Amino acid sequence: MAQYGKTALELYKEFALCPPEVFPPYNDELVRVVQMEVQEHKALLDAAFMAAEEKVQKSEQAGTSAQVLGDARKIDRFPEDVSTIVVHHSSILRNKRLLLAYSQMRLDKIKALRWQGRSLPDDIKNNLSTAELQYFKSYDRLLSRYMRHGEGVGQDLTLDLIPPKDPEIQVRALEDYGEMVASNGTIHFQKNAVFFMAQEDAEPLIRQHVLERMDMADLH
């Protein structure tokens, strides 16, 4: 009995105890093992119910009064069967909760990755299941439509998860990137050049490590 739910707990810990920067592969093998365990508990649960029902029927046949017949219908007259039913039912619920928690943690992290960028890194993409990849694509379409001009709010909400105090930020070029037409004019990116530009224009280049924010750099 001590082993009931052990595999599901291992599956949960496999993801929950990972460092934030690590996205472990979808463990299809352990998921199948847990699903099979649930099916086994269901079969044992059905068998326990049938055994209890047989005892109830025998008690009814042996009863001689309405009171006895009424009491004989209660499964709690057979504590050994009640214990078996409770153990297997609780095991099914525990396994399902851990499976759902495992899936939800992975989906939450997949959504967080979308807020960090529109494309998944190859090393993470290879660790997702087919259903998870489809989930990312669907969530990407939904979020993009919500932020679209004319159809949604008309603003890229992924640029900064913390509302900026100023629409412009000070940045430094980390490489010779050439020219770019920004919202406030044309900017020539020369390595180590420092200038102000709109945060909406700067954030994509910061993510590509073309620029760095001066306030962030000062923290190092």
Image (spheres, rainbow, N blue to C red):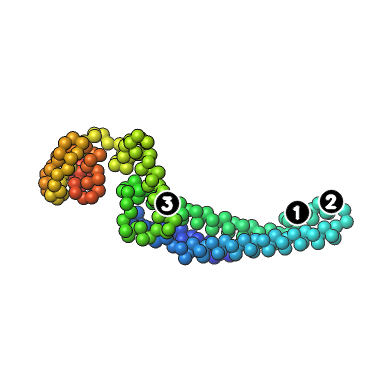
Residue shown at 23% from the left, 39% from the top: 199
Tag 3 secondary structure: helix
Front position in the image: 127 or 154 = 154
Front position in the image: 16 or 173 = 173
Check contact, mark 3 vs mark 1: CB within 8 A.
no
User: Horizontal placement of 152 versus 6: left or right?
Assistant: left
The residue that label 3 is drawn on is 135
Residue shown at 20% from the left, 43% from the top: 213
Image coords of residue 85 (percent x, y): 66, 59
Hey, what amino acid is under mark 3? Tyr
Disc assigned to residue 67: 2
The residue that label 1 is drawn on is 74
Residue shown at 72% from the left, 61% from the top: 50
Q: Residues within 10 Å of mark 1 (few under 14, many from 20)?
A: few
Image coords of residue 2 (percent x, y): 55, 64
Q: CA distance from mark 3 to mark 1?
A: 47 Å
Hey, what amino acid is under mark 1? Lys
User: Horizontal placement of 67 versus 174: left or right?
Assistant: right
Q: CA distance from mark 2 to mark 3?
A: 58 Å
Image coords of residue 128 (percent x, y): 40, 58
Q: Quarter of the image holding residue 1?
A: bottom right
Image coords of residue 211 (percent x, y): 19, 46
Q: Residues within 10 Å of mark 3 (few under 14, many from 20)?
A: some
Q: Earlier in the sequence, mark 2 or mark 1?
A: 2
Front position in the image: 197 or 47 = 197
